[in-house]
Amino acid sequence: MNHYCTYFDRGFLIPGLALARSLAAHDPAAVLWVLALDDETAAVLREIGGPGLRVVPLAELEADDPGLAAAKADRTQVEYYFTLSPCWPRWLLRAQPAIERLTYLDADMFFLASPAGIFAALDEAKASVLITAHRFPSWLRHYEQHGHFNVGLLVFANDDAGRGCLDTWREECLAWCHDRIEPGRYADQKYLDVWPERLGGRLLVLPDAGVNLAPWNWAGRRYECAADGVVRVDDAPVVLFHYARFRPVWGTWWWQSGQLDYGVMPGRLRRALYGPYWRALERARAEIAARRPGFDFPRRPARRGRAYWRALPLRVVFGGDWLRVGDAFFNLRLGAGRWSGQVLTKLRTIRLRR
């Protein structure tokens, strides 16, 4: 039996439930442990979660980890959430010693195929910890200032190496975990850069392009979209996609893709990857609304600061906001969107030279 964990609040309740349902579909015997960051999230999940879902309220973790609770004083809410990344799986492995291996997932991820290959690779490598690189294409390498590796998928064995890795990472995040770049650190993520040296052969950097495929690394690869809905990347099935920054802007027909900074994927691939996710989100929304009438995606206030106006010409040219019709998402830029990441990189280079 595979054990997974994640955490989210009401704002991510719909994607979080979609993740849980996708996991149940592709790893039916799995258990997903959710750290509920508010009372409403805990209550809803306890009502509709099902036998494979376990709910732990944030207060329970904070009561057992005074250092974590104390960290609230010097960081914002999102920075505190970053701080949870090592604390939550560390606590869970100690509270549930029968768990042999624990997989952490960001709440905005979604399974499209069985994760069995992930664990087969980990067993073959005889490793205790598994991570994935961001895999930026060449024109996006400057984003590695945020970290070479992505926190979205992490696996820890319940052994000395796995627990020791979490202990050290927790100490680092309790000491400093802020939403800004400083030499050698950024939030919870930049700390992972030293894991290959620190863990040596106990670490597996999974090379599979179909695991933690994301807006920042889809470009420059070969894809096959089969009639049965199976998507392959570089001859491997897409197992786990990271739908970062994908959210509704107006109703459920106008969406922010989260891809403008990296390059907007072409329509056929977009439909193959985002169509199933949209349907899963809609099912999750309906499932929650059946118990909580009127429950919907959170409505985030529009931001009209300098960053918005600076990006507006790029949004006009390249898109990045999608019109949903059925389960298809239209960028309405005749394919120009795929060049947005490269153009943004060139503009950034020009600014740095001035």
Image (cartoon, rainbow, N blue to C red):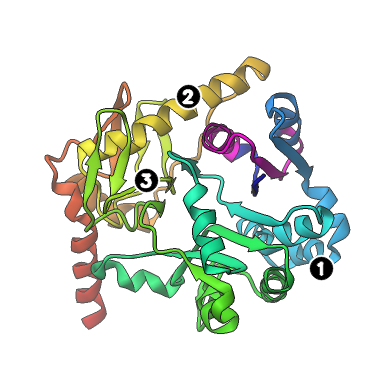
Quarter of image, res 286: top right
Residue type (three-letter) at the residue carrying disc 1: Gly
Mark nearer the N terminus (2 vs 3): 3
Corner quadrant of residue 52 = top right
**Is the residue marked by circle 3 packed among few (<14), some (14-19), or many (20+) residues within 10 Å?**
many
Disc 1: CA contacts within 10 A as few (<14), some (14-19) or many (>=20): some
Q: Residue 203 in the image: state x and y as whole percent.
A: 55, 72
Identified at 32% across, 25% down, the residue is: 327
Q: Which of marks 1 and 2 is nearer the N terminus?
A: 1
Mark 1 highlights which residue?
A: 67
* Residue at position x 30%, y 35% in the image: 272
Of the pair 170 and 295, the residue shown nearer to us: 170
- Mark 1 or mark 3, which is nearer the start of the sequence? 1
> Which structural element holds mark 1?
helix
Q: In the current view of this chain or complex, which residue is farthest to the right? A: 63
Which of pointers 3 and 1 indicates the residue nearer the eye? 3
Which residues fall within the magenta stretch? 12-40
Q: Which amino acid does label 2 sit on?
A: Glu
Name which quarter of the figure residue 157 lies in.
bottom right
Furthest-front residue in this view: 124
Question: In the image, which disc is placed on residue 53?
Answer: none
As drawn, 73 above or below 309: below
Residue indicated by mark 2 = 282
Across the whole image, how many numbered discs are drawn on residues?
3
Query: Which dot marks residue 238?
Result: 3
In the visual, does 326 lie left or right of 39? left
Q: Which element carries disc 2, helix, strand or loop?
A: helix
Q: Is residue 347 rendered to the left or right of residue 144?
A: left
SS at mark 3 in the image: loop
Q: Is residue 81 rendered magenta in the image?
A: no
Residue found at x 56% / y 31%: 21
